[in-house]
Image: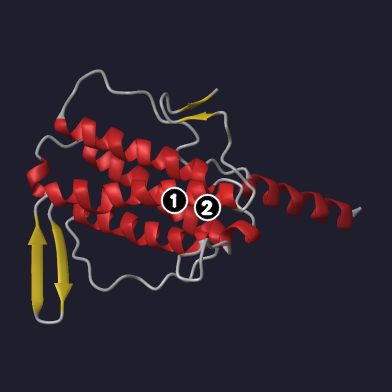
């Protein structure tokens, strides 16, 4: 009886951890007003939704897939999106960026971190009226470079959108297309 209880307990813990909801299964409802912060927040939400569905249900076969020997695998693309999500969030927290982090997370962990980084970034932006306070800061050896928020838009945010699209294309090429019920127009599941 004791063994059955322990097995039941461990199964429930495992099931509840696997059922932890990640952000961006659907895009949250839109704000009632238009502000620069709300608009940027919504852009991040759209990115989060696209990444969620581009990365949902990837198999090892998909993660290792590459179109040519010179191209990135899906996993390498995800690692790059992770670095971009850190860059975006660091800017919004006023933190400098040093070298790109060496990613040591497994697929499920890195996917979760990316989605949480996007969610936190969206939340910070939704409460902002002055985007000029968010600088991208690079600290390199004996060199500090700052860029205004404008570079955030055409730089890491749009780059992450670009690579989320590549991820969707790579998974289709490896035989595991994105869920057709995910509507990028509405941000909902049909």
Q: Which class describes the residues within 10 Å of circle 1: few (<14), some (14-19), or many (20+)?
A: some
Q: Nearer the viewer, residue 169 or 128?
A: 169
Residue 13: numbered disc:
none
The residue that appears at 22% across and 66% down in the rendered structure is: 97
Q: Which class describes the residues within 10 Å of circle 2: few (<14), some (14-19), or many (20+)?
A: many
Percent position of residue 46, x then y: 36, 36
Q: Secondary structure at mark 2?
A: helix
Marks 1/2 in contact by CB < 8 Å: the verdict is yes
Q: How is the image coloured?
A: secondary structure
Residue, far bottom = 141
Q: Nearer the viewer, residue 114 or 176?
A: 176
The residue that appears at 24% across and 42% down in the rendered structure is: 124
Residue, far right = 1
Q: Secondary structure at mark 1?
A: helix
Residue, far front = 68
CA distance for labels 1 and 2: 6 Å
Q: Is residue 115 visible?
A: no
Q: Is residue 102 left or right of residue 179?
A: left
Total tally of numbered discs in the picture: 2
Q: Which residue is mark 2?
A: 170
The residue that appears at 51% across and 63% down in the rendered structure is: 73
Percent position of residue 177, x then y: 59, 43
Percent position of residue 188, x then y: 48, 26
Residue 166: numbered disc:
1
Q: Nearer the viewer, residue 148 or 22?
A: 148
Q: Quadrant of residue 142?
A: bottom left
């Amino acid at each position: 009886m004791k063994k059955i209880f322990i097995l039941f307990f461990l199964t429930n813990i495992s099931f509840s951890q696997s059922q932890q909801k990640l952000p961006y299964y659907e895009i949250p409802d839109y704000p009632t007003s238009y502000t620069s912060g709300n608009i940027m927040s919504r852009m991040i939400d759209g990115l989060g939704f696209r990444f969620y569905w581009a990365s949902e249900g990837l198999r090892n076969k998909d993660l290792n897939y590459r179109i040519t020997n010179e191209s990135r695998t899906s996993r390498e693309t995800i690692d790059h999106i992770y670095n971009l999500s850190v860059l975006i969030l660091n800017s919004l927290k006023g933190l400098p960026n040093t070298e790109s982090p060496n990613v040591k997370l497994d697929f499920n962990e890195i996917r979760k971190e990316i989605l949480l980084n996007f969610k936190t970034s969206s939340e910070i932006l939704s409460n902002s009226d002055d985007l000029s306070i968010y600088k991208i800061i690079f600290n390199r050896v004996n060199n500090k470079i700052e860029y205004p928020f404008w570079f955030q838009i055409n730089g890491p945010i749009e780059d992450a959108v670009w690579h989320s699209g590549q991820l969707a294309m790579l998974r289709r090429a490896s035989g595991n297309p994105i869920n057709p019920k995910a509507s990028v127009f509405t941000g909902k599941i049909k």
